[in-house]
Amino acid sequence: MAKDTTGRLRVTVKTGGKRKLSSKLWLERQLNDPYVAQAKRDGWRSRAAYKLIEMDDKYRLLKPGMAVVDLGAAPGGWSQVAARRVGAVEGKGTNKGKVVAIDLLAMPEISGVTFAQLDFLDAAAPDRLIAMMEGKADVVLSDMAANTTGHRKTDQLRIIGLVESAAAFAADVLRPGGTFVAKVFQSGADADLLAQLKRDFATVRHVKPASSRQDSSERYVMATGFRGRSTTP
């Protein structure tokens, strides 16, 4: 171990065997990330929980009684936060919210969360979600990230394509006044996507929570006040 510039002890992972350099760097980052350690102490499934907590504390996205869809939910950090904040865990009556989590991967059960192992890109997914929630959603969350190739332009196209698909899904399942939050990278949402979101939502902004790694180009697009799909080209 050695101390970093803040004086904290830093864990260094040795190379060797079959471990790739990228794996070594990822493991070191995880072991030395204070949010990873804090998430374990607080009972969150991932450090990503703090990003949603920060955004919700500032913008009040999640309220008791709301219905929430979490796309690409595994391992479940955002679903945990949403379930607690909308009252899906302990709420009663009109204050009891609903959270439906979707992922291609299996995910262990979370209190107050209904999980569906399916592809949100499936044409039948929006209707299935609405049936599960017994109505439309107030909030659609997406912390998904496309698989990267290392080629910047290709990766950016994949990222934007995934966000565009998530936004189209949100437009199918959100009720008027709803909110859409999705992970983007680098320069944020591209011009075409941003223009579409501004037509469909009253307010669109980019935010970067303090708990996002500072060396990451990660940020979030937050669209509030859904007013329905625009038919204007």
Image: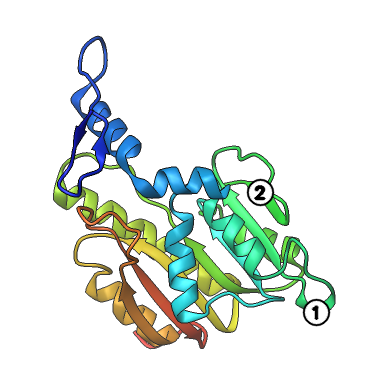
Can the viewer see residue 45 in this picture? no
Q: Position of residue 132 (x, y in %)?
A: 74, 60
Can the viewer see residue 86 in this picture? yes
Residue 12 relative to residue 69: left or right: left
| Residue at x 15%, y 47% (from the top left corner) | 5
| Residue at x 69%, y 43% (from the top left corner) | 109
Nearest the camera: 71 or 2?
A: 2
**Gap between marks 2 and 1, in whole Å?**
24 Å
Q: How is the image coloured?
A: rainbow
Kindly give the residue lying farthest to the right in the view shown.
93
Q: Position of residue 154 (x, y in %)?
A: 20, 48
Query: What type is the residue that disc 2 sits on?
Result: Ala
Query: What type is the residue that disc 1 sits on?
Result: Thr
Determine which of the numbered discs, if any, sits on residue 94 in the image: 1
Nearest the camera: 9 or 42?
A: 9
> Residue 2 lies in what quarter of the image?
top left
Nearest the camera: 127 or 79?
A: 79
Residue 42 relative to residue 186: left or right: right
| Residue at x 28%, y 39% (from the top left corner) | 29
Q: Earlier in the sequence, mark 2 or mark 1?
A: 1
For marks 2 and 1, give the one nearer the viewer: 1
Q: Crowdedness of circle 2 by 10 Å Cα count: few (<14), some, many (20+)? A: many
Determine which of the numbered discs, if any, sits on residue 147 in the image: none
**Of helix, strand and loop, which one carries label 1?**
helix
Q: Position of residue 45 (x, y in %)?
A: 54, 45
Kindly give the residue lying farthest to the front in the view shown.
7
